[in-house]
Structures are given as C-alpha cells and as structure tokens.
Amino acid sequence: METSTLSATPQIINKDQLLTHWLGHRKVTRRTLEAFPEKELFEFSIGGMRTFAQLMKEMLAMDSTTAKGLATDAWEALDEEKVELTTKSELLSSWDKSTEEIQQYWKDITMEEFQKKIVAFGQYEGTGYSILFYIIDNEIHHRGQGFVYLRALGITPPNFWEQY
C-alpha cells in the first residue's frame, strides 16, 4: 500500500530547518560582502567574471523575490542591475532588508507550494523546492567567487562553516 500524502512522508528536515540552513548561508555571504574594500567590491574581477557587487545584485534580485513568489504565487521580473545600489553600505542594507523579507514571507509558504510546478520570474520552470535550491546554490556559487576575489586581494574570507 502506497501513501501519497505529504504528512505521511518521512522527511530529513522540516521547513523551519530549511529556512535556518538558508539564513546560515546568507550570514556567511553577508560577512563576505563586509570583507570587501569598497573600491574592489565594485571594480575587481578575475578572468572577465563580474565584480562581487554585480554578483550581489544578482542574488538580491532573486532571494526575497523567490520567497515572495512561493508565498503569494506572484512572481516579479528580475532586476539584476539594481543601479540604485552604488555603495557597500547600500548593498549591506539591501541584503538585510531582503533577509527580513525572506523571513516574513516564509511563514506563508505552504508545504504543497514546494512540490507544485511553477514558472519562477516568468521564465524558469521547476518545482518550488527546485527553484529554492537553485537560489541557495547560486548564492553559494557566487560567494565562492567572492572568496577567490578576497584571496586574490590578500584578504582571508570568512569561514564558510560558521553560519551563526
């Protein structure tokens, strides 16, 4: 006999643990941003890659917008340019605001929404959980680029395992 309800399905972590995991990554990414000197944040790159400021703007375009989309089923278009963010302080403030928005919307995301087929940002097809995992993986990937930049600048990046 096969059970098809979500409540009867064993799980590895619950929704709140998933949020804690995501927020832990966000804390490390924030500390990575804090470690950058202002000038290099907006100008330094290696091998034609985007600057860390540009990578941060991409993450900011998707993070709380994903939480909002999962909670409301209303997906905004991506604005990766974020031309209004021109200083490190503005990026940090935007990051903090976005983290608050993630926490605000999270409580309204149903477990069913993670399983539902969606089209995020009007262009990316997947399930709620696959889109969310992409957002988290994308942040980790870009933070890794930031780590490389910091090392190239002679700056030790934050410990990725310290997600407090």
Image (cartoon, helix red, strand yellow):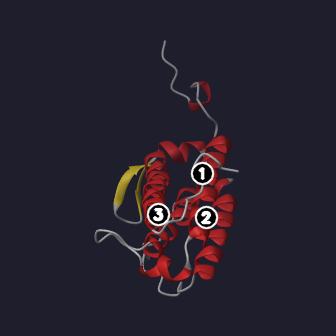
The residue pinned by badge 3 equals 146
SS assignment at label 3: helix
Query: What x and y, as percent, mark residue 22?
Result: 59, 51
Quarter of the image holding residue 27? bottom right
Mark 2 and mark 1: Cα distance apart in space: 12 Å
Mark 1 and mark 3: Cα distance apart in space: 13 Å
Q: Residues within 10 Å of mark 3 (few under 14, many from 20)?
A: many
Q: Residues within 10 Å of mark 2 (few under 14, many from 20)?
A: some
The residue pinned by badge 1 equals 159
Evaluate whether residue 104 shows in this view.
Answer: yes
Please report contact status of discs 1 and 3: CB closer than 8 Å, yes or no. no
Q: Nearer the viewer, residue 21 or 78?
A: 21
- The residue under the point 34% across, 63% down is 123
Under mark 2, the amino acid is: Arg
Which mark sits nearer the N-terminus, 1 or 3? 3
Vertical arrangement, residue 159 with respect to residue 62, above or below? above
Quarter of the image holding residue 144? bottom left
Q: Is residue 29 left or right of residue 48?
A: right
Which mark sits nearer the N-terminus, 2 or 3? 2
Query: What x and y, as percent, mark residue 92?
Result: 62, 74
Under mark 3, the amino acid is: Gly
Which mark sits nearer the N-terminus, 2 or 1? 2
The residue pinned by badge 2 equals 30
Q: Nearer the viewer, residue 129 or 150?
A: 150
Mark 2 and mark 3: Cα distance apart in space: 11 Å
